[in-house]
Image (cartoon, grey):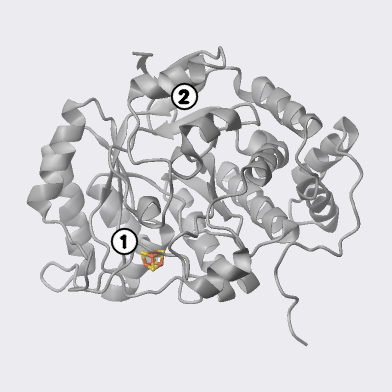
Amino acid sequence: MLAPEPGPDAAAAPSLAWSPELQARLQAALEVDPLSPEATSLAEALLRQPPGEALRAQADALRAQLVGDTVTYVVNRNLNFTNHCLQHCSFCAFRRDAGEAGAFWHSFDTLQQRAAEAQRWGATELCIQGGLNPEARLNGSALAYYQALLTALLQAAPGVHLHAFSPQELLFIAEQDQIPLQAVIEALRAAGLGSIPGTAAEVLSEPVRRLLCPEKITARQWCAVMLQVHRSGLASTATLMAGHLEGPSDRAAHLLTLVALQQAAWQHQQAGFSEFVLLPFIGAQAPAALRQRVGRDQPDTAAMLALTAQARLLLGRWLVNHQPSWVKLTLAGATEALRWGCNDLGGTLMEESITSMAGALGGTIQTPQALCAAAGSLARPVRERTTLYGPVAACV
Ligand code: SF4
């Protein structure tokens, strides 16, 4: 028997309006078992709620209850060190083969200059991700290359927080060197790794991944890497890429899985996920077949705002920091998302390649002043934070 096609689940019965009673039942079910039939059915009902003021108001009230009114941001710089990649995810406009037009692989010198420059501009974090480049080796070892990269960046920008390498990249290093994942995590941590971006999750649904990114790590592998990262004492972020081929049940399964992983981390007194980031699908540069199937190039803003609210309501106390992507939504869209359950505007980034090469319209840099002004336009207090949501300073 074939697995059901992923999609918007149009045949599902309309749900009852989301009420405080349903919200309380969902949260009670999550406490018992986030993967139970009861939690799943309530989560799917929530994920089928239409965009609307009632949904927005409930999410906004829960945000205020859990984290207050203050909007946070981090001063950081993205360093996409290479776009050479051996995989071919169907939505990805970033990857290149070596030698192809637009391919790049920056030297340590260049990356050190950018890291030092970022620190002079006030960055407390470098966010480092790249393609899966099989040539990235030192003395024959992929791990040695990635360790040397972190060491070089810390030499150039002492004390900066290194937020680096997705679960996909960590597993790639282990596979390249044929060593256990735990050895990779420990070695990178010893070289200064501070936390992990929760990218490459896309949507944690095997049928959707088989269509969207069949070469990528499976949902099960993403979860296994995250469990190990958290148990090693490193925090990570959590992401969901939405607005492509997935339906409400896929989104529900993804968010419930995040709750289960957070519970596992907390049971071991680990920090687990520090924040949830919704990444709307950008398809402007995606292959024609995928664009045609999805039916749009830029996110459906109303649908993404509804999902922002639904994620806030579902994740509840398990993941309290919610961040929209200004790169994908524009800063105006991200500011609106602060009214739908978000409490963080993310980073200044200073440069961004992955989403801008996919055709996003939000730009590649924000100043702290612009982020402060965005929060201020809603009469919300604002403060700079560290990567892990510690205090830095009052707003500029
Ligand atoms: S999404 Fe990442 S792994 Fe997939 S092709 Fe692009 S760079 Fe490579």
Position of residue 292 measured from the top left corner of the image (x, y, whole percent): 58, 69
Residue type at numbered disc 2: Thr
State the SS at label 1: helix
Decide if residue 365 is in sight here.
yes
Q: From what the image shows, is residue 210 above or below residue 368? A: below
User: Which residue lies under the disc numbered 1?
Assistant: 184
In front here: 108 or 336? 336
Apparent side of residue 357 relative to residue 99 in the rendered image (left or right)? right
Mark 2 closeness class: few <14, some 14–19, many ≥20 residues within 10 Å: many
Amino acid type, residue under disc 1 in the picture? Val
Is 108 drawn above or below residue 65 in the view shown? below
The image shows residue 224 at horizontal and vertical percentages of 52, 63
Q: Which dot, 1 or 2, sits closer to the camera?
A: 2
Q: Is residue 150 above or below residue 208?
A: above
Position of the C terminus by quadrant: top left
Which numbered disc covers residue 119? none
- Residue displayed at 30% across by 58% down: 130
Closest to the observer, 259 or 11: 11
The residue lying furthest to the bottom in this view is 1
For disc 1, the neighbor class at 10 Å (few under 14, some 14 to 19, many from 20) is many
Label 2 element class: strand
Please identify the quadrant where the N terminus is shown: bottom right
Q: Nearer the viewer, residue 321 or 90?
A: 90
Please indicate, yes or no, whether residue 391 appears anywhere in the rendered image. no
Residue 330 coordinates in the image, percent (x, y): 47, 37
Rendered residue at 41%/49% (across/down): 197
Question: Whole-Å distance between the Cαs marked 1 and 2?
Answer: 32 Å
Q: Nearer the viewer, residue 349 or 40?
A: 349
- Residue 73 is drawn in which quadrant? top left
Q: Label 2: which residue?
A: 72
